[in-house]
Amino acid sequence: MVDRLQDMRLFRLVVQTGSLSTAGRQMGLSPAAMSGRLKAMEEFYGLRLLKRNTRSLSPTAEGQLLFENALKILEEVDALDSIIKNGQSDLLGTIGLTCPTDLGRQWISQMVDAFISENPHVSIRLFFTDRILDFVESGSDIAIRFGDLPDSSLIARSLGVDRQILCCSAQYLEQHGAPLSPEDLHHHNCLVQLRADFALDRWKFMNKGVSTTIQVKGNRLANDGFTLRQWAVQGLGIIWKSGWEVAEDIQAKRLVPLLEEYQCPTTGFHLLTEGGKKLPLRVKSFVDFAVHYFKNLDTPSRYLLPPP
């Protein structure tokens, strides 16, 4: 078993450095010894683990699978070693977390700070993106997302609810006036979110049981929610955005809500983990912490909940 763990450490370092000789120097092994160890590993598995050329090497599909799982196994082993050697009872290791950009900058980064202050031996690898990534692609343990759940294999914990809010700056209102109905948006500059190169330009509204969908347009589109919000604050257009992401701007009067008599769609706000496997203690603890954190968060909730 010790040899298998040593082989995993060796293989992890080879993939991370992209070089047998560099990995060998760090492990104190000669190039010949490194080649011999790698050959023995490939004979054990009965297939190639690395693709080599004159300048570099990279893992095969099977090698990539070994590398990804070796990272997790070695992290758990190192955490156990630390507990036994040092008497540590604290949480240890790294948590991979992905979330929308604007939400991450405003709320999630603060939650991460709070969690690490209570668990100083945990590292958080925080990845902001407005794309919906799968767990393998992003290398994450946890994803925080708005909207419906696309994959039934994921385990969801509710962090609350979210609704879209139409808003702009007071400066924009002074220059262009306020839309009095969703149809008036055809005559306004709307700031549009991009997702996977598709424009989310069909904005939905409900009034007295009647649903209206408006296809909007404008001179600024972005796949980054933070950028869209900053454009709106600068008076460059109207946005249709998550209440979590504009609530503080509205409270601080940097943005003004529009068409408040109309109801915008309400969606879930979830923390997701992969199903079918036991979560490491640090990940489970973070999930519980996040649920409690958002439940007790002091927010301007009138902009997060559907109107009565």
Image: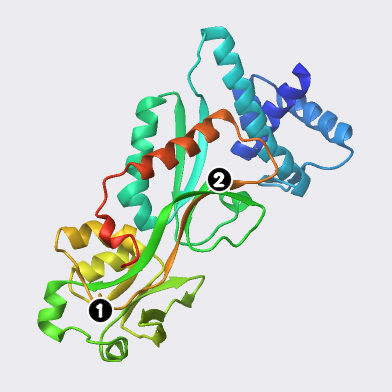
Q: Amino acid at mark 2?
A: Ser
Look at the numbered disc 1 and give the secondary structure of its residue: loop
In which quadrant is the N terminus drawn? top right
Name the amino acid, label 1: Leu
Where residue 32 sits: x, y (%)?
Answer: 76, 26
User: Which of 117 and 224 lies nearest the eye of the viewer?
Assistant: 117
Q: Earlier in the sequence, mark 2 or mark 1?
A: 2
Report if the CB atoms under discs 2 and 1 are less than 8 Å apart: no
User: CA separation, marks 2 and 1?
Assistant: 38 Å
Residue under numbered circle 2: 140
Relative vertical location of residue 144 with respect to residue 15 in this rendering, above or below: below
* Residue count near mark 1 (Cα–Cα under 10 Å), binned few <14, some 14–19, many ≥20: some
Q: Residue at 18% of width from left, 74% of height from top?
A: 235
Where's residue 299, x and y in %?
A: 27, 50
Horizontal arrangement in the rendering, residue 270 relative to residue 304 (left or right): right
- Kindly identify which numbered label has been placed on residue 259: 1
The residue located at (60%, 55%) in the rendering is 134
